[in-house]
Amino acid sequence: MQITSAGQLLELCSQGKEKLAQVVAEYEAFRSNTSVQAVLERMGATLEVMRASVEKGREDEGKLSRLITGYGRLFARAEQEGRLLGGSLFKNAVLYALAVGQYNASLGRIVACPTAGSCGVVPGALLAAAEELGSGDQELIDALLVMGGVGIVSAAQGPISGAEGGCQAECGVASAMAAGAVVDLAGGSPEQVFAAASLALQSHLGLVCDPLASLVEVPCVTRNATSAVTALAAANMALAGIPAVVPYDEVVGAMKAIGRALPESLRETSLGGLAATPTGRRLAQELREQYRL
Amino acid sequence: MAQIGLFDIVGPVMVGPSSSHTAGAVRLGLAARRILGSEVQRAEIELHGSFAATYWGHRTDVALVAGLLGMTMDDERIPQAFELARAAGLEYTFASADLGDVHPNSVRIHASGSAGAITMCGSSIGGGRINIFELNGFQVAVDGSYWVLLTRHRDTPGVIAEVTKVLAIHGINIAFLDVSRQARGSDALLLAQTDDPIPDLAVDHVRRIPQVLAVRTLPCF
């Protein structure tokens, strides 16, 4: 059994009347020569790591990160003091994504999803949505399986690293995965899952990977938060029946082609974009002098 | 096309900040320790390319030492690796080096301990995946997803047949088999990657083959 595209996954679902989550769990059980139960248990353990990274990240003071300092803490304090706009879904998505991104920069334990650089997007959108919906662990594990399905078809057809495809391949794919998972959690159909994924990735096309001083900090951590919010917007649009028009597989194809067209300076080399601004260059220079080998 | 693992996408669970520069580096350090076969007492670590340029941001240095101490990429003690190394009596040095036309995220580790000494070159190739491409001067290709049997032996006819026979007797399936040598008549290296774990009994049998000078197994890592 192979998972090669969104189109193929959707066909499997419509033929066998199986849930998307079930197809993905069976695929992984077959692939890794284990049982569906073992796959579900491992996904449950992964969910616990995600939750712990949110909890630890919102307390993290950022003593180990080089450029950013306690972004989750700052946001949580502002929320407590009533200085922020919006409802709890929106605020929590940003808070959780920031917390996990900060924790990653602080050498904390996270779930790379699909990459460490984009590790805050899924916990941000999905855990905030789960609170809003009052979802239980079983539903969340199913949503994570659906999300894995979106990720697998992405990786099967395009890049999922900044070095190959730019940030669209990291935060963009993470946002697509999160959008699909949120739709599943909210009771949407498999078609709506991939419509949401498509809409989320469409909004990230062309996004370059240009981190300051080769760190996974600026703009990565705040971009994780905006990608989580984009995922929620895409999920809502798909649930409303707004079509993606371009199917997910074709959007991944466009992402791949755009990645190839990006110069190397905009693919994780810290030679272009924000990294090449006067501020970016100055900060990198200061850090390099401090840590010359 | 290879099947993509669900937990390679929703994962790995790892200590940040970078899958290639941190998680992959932990695995490279751990690979060196497993290949050495004992605790590491001394390590000379040479960083190449992007590893040398950005180690301080991604804590590639801390991650490599954590791996040498036996930690896996999800170990929450990784940030304290330097302190733990001091407590464990592991001495290490870092330098930058040009390892040639290899992956930008590469390292050469010379590690020694009670089991002897090894020199290993490896790359972190993304997403926490690694490739060990040189071991004690021999070209190899090991990514840690299979069990490995390594022998150093006299380059004479029949040794490879004997080694693979032992594996067959123990019901171990060979997925990949590489043999190499530095020169005709000198020592040669056999590297078998297997689908099944290699029991101690099989290792003992291989060790008793007269032309075999040294045997080592590596678990998946």
Image (cartoon, coloured by chain):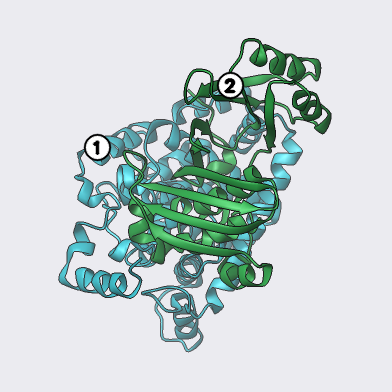
Chain colours: A cyan, B green
Q: Residue at x 70, y 52 (%)?
A: B114
**Residue A240 makes an appearance in the image:** no
B203 up-or-down from A164: above or below: above
For the residue pair B79 and A185, the one nearer the viewer reads as B79
| Nearer-the-camera pick, A150 or B208 | B208
Q: Quadrant of the C terminus of chain B?
A: top right
**Taking A288 as reference, is A267 above or below it?**
above
Checking the image for residue A32, the label placed there is: none
Give residue A260's mark: 1
Determine which of the numbered discs, if any, sits on residue B176 in the image: 2
Q: Nearer the viewer, residue B34 or B172?
A: B34
Image coordinates for residue B202, horizontal then vertical, percent? 79, 26
**Vertical placement of residue A46 versus A229, above or below:** above
Whether tag 1 and tag 2 are in contact, CB under 8 A, the answer is: no
Q: Quadrant of the rendered structure where residue A53 is?
A: bottom right
Looking at the image, residue B199 sits to the left or right of residue A227; the answer is: right
Residue lying at the far bottom in this picture: please name it: A81
Q: Position of residue A6 (x, y in %)?
A: 46, 31
Residue kind at label 2, given as amino acid type: Phe
